[in-house]
Amino acid sequence: MNHSDRNIAQPLAALVAADPDRPSSVCQRASALEAVRLALQRDLQLAFRKRGQLVQPLAFFAMVTLLFPLAISPELARLRELAPGVLWVGALLGSLLALEFLFRDDAHDGTLEQYALSGQSLTALMVAKTIAHWLLTGLPLALMAPLAAVSLGVHTGALPGILFAVAVGSVALSLIGSIGAALTLGIKRSGALLSLLTLPLSLPVLIFGARATQLAIHGASFAAPLELLGALAVLGGTLAPLAAAAAVRISLE
Amino acid sequence: MNWTWFHRLASPPHVYALAVRLTPWFAWPAALCIAAGLWGGLVLAPPDYQQGDGFRIIYVHAPSAWMSLMVYVTMAGAAAVGLIWRMKVAHAVAASCAPIGASFTFAALVTGALWGQPMWGTYWEWDPRLTSELVLLFLYLGYMGLRAGIEDPQRADRASAVLAVVGVVNVPIIHYSVTWWNSLHQAPSVMRLGKPAMPLAMLVPLLLMLLGFTLFFVALLLTRVRGEVLARERTASWIREVVRA
């Protein structure tokens, strides 16, 4: 085990409940909030050591954006009309692509098992994993969406709205996706099944997100669809970690 | 309150015997209702003053669409019972619901498309109801795909049960967001002329068909549950007695 791996193992050990035979100073159980922080820190640290994987969804998003002008027409006026759909389909597929990695490595090396045995709330740890997933894919996609929008002929006034809409919508997408990723744990070649499970549940996000983007491009107030996106994110935040935790436990049975 | 009947539902031999006994009690009334409804709808009911005889597909379309939703709710209910009380028979019921529900959804889509061709002039219209019906079909396919993808039967039961419960929370959200999406994109189509009250000669056969389809679903479900229980309990000793009898 090299030095860098040990660094990651340490926070994991801190999650585990104290062994009654050991002096409590050796292995103290972390509080729930501390556990979330440690799990989040671990996920981010691991992700930054594999930077190649971080770039993949972004490159995919850029590729999808490139496909549309080539397939339809290079006229900016037409592309501007299509921009909301192109941006949201790209963001949806990009975030879907990253979902496969959400639990896969942790299931392989037994980390998920340790999480389930740690005595910490698995739901809280799922929240941590989802936050990490959003920080690593949703937020970068949101930051890249304005760039893609500019290439589709959207004027700069609409860009803050687009950034906001993708940022809020991708929270909901990460939450919905965590359920699908947890349910397909342990299935070989789960990619197609994962999209079949996740995409129908993501349709409301797509609808409201594309609508907010469209209104932003037309310079109208996009508060209503943005608020609905926020509502979906909040609803997902309350229910999705529970379902994902139940699914992870089932996969470990 | 006496809960014995509920606890006995956890026993596969009891459920198997119950299903055998109850099936004809649903199958025959279903056949009668559907026959009477078809006769009333296709022969006795007068043609619609706008749609002519084309409207008669409603006697298959509306009950199928109604069943596609009802079967999903039944499936999610059974799945929740299976998750909460760890009742294996409930999972068998949920597993039996999925292909039936998917078939009803498919029937509703096909009849809707066939009706759309003469009425709207196109087989497919991005009408909110047709669209949510299509999404429902994907939900069924996802459920069956997940169940088929997991090899261990108990894990497959519990994982697909979580999916069914998540789906039932989402069905209304999807339906209303799709309605909202369409009402913003498209001017009201021909069909929103307001609902003229249906004359009794048209309504009664429709209600008969609804009742008949519901009874038909229960009979079909009982039959599938019998097969499902037999397949799951194939190593148990009571099966031998059933087969011998």
Image (cartoon, coloured by chain):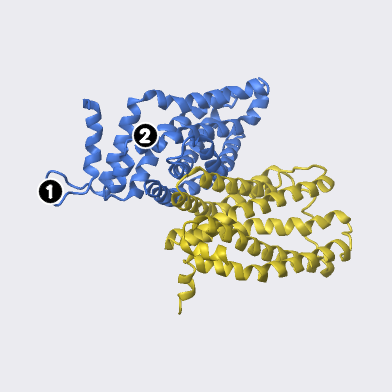
Quadrant of the image containing the N terminus of chain B: bottom left
Residue B58 location in percent, x, y?
A: 78, 57
Amino acid on which the number 1 mark rests in the picture: Ser
| Residue at 68%, 51% in the rendered image | B129
Classify mark 2: helix, strand or loop.
Answer: helix
Q: Which mark is residue B141?
A: none
Question: Residue shown at 79%/65% (left/top)?
Answer: B35
SS state under label 1: loop
Given residues B20 and A148, the one toward you in this image is B20
Measuring 63% from the left and 47% from the top, which residue is drawn there?
Answer: B137
- Judge whether residue A138 can be spotted in this image: no
Image coordinates of residue B120 in percent, x first then y, are 81, 46
Same chain letter for marks 1 and 2:
yes
Q: Position of residue B179 (x, y in %)?
A: 65, 50
Q: Is residue A173 left or right of residue B210?
A: left
Q: Disc 2 residue type?
A: Asp
Q: Earlier in the sequence, mark 1 or mark 2?
A: 1
Mark 1 to mark 2 CA distance (whole Å): 31 Å
Residue B132 to residue A9: above or below: below
Q: Which of the numbered marks, if any, corresponds to residue A24? A: 1
Chain B shade in the render: yellow
Asked whether residue B113 appears in the rendered view, the answer is yes
- Circle number at residue A105: 2
Disc 1 chain ID: A
Letter of the blue chain? A
Residue B131 lies left or right of residue B189; in this view the side is: left
The relative height of residue A147 versus residue A129 in the rendered view (above or below) is: above
Q: Residue at x 83, y 43 (%)?
A: B121
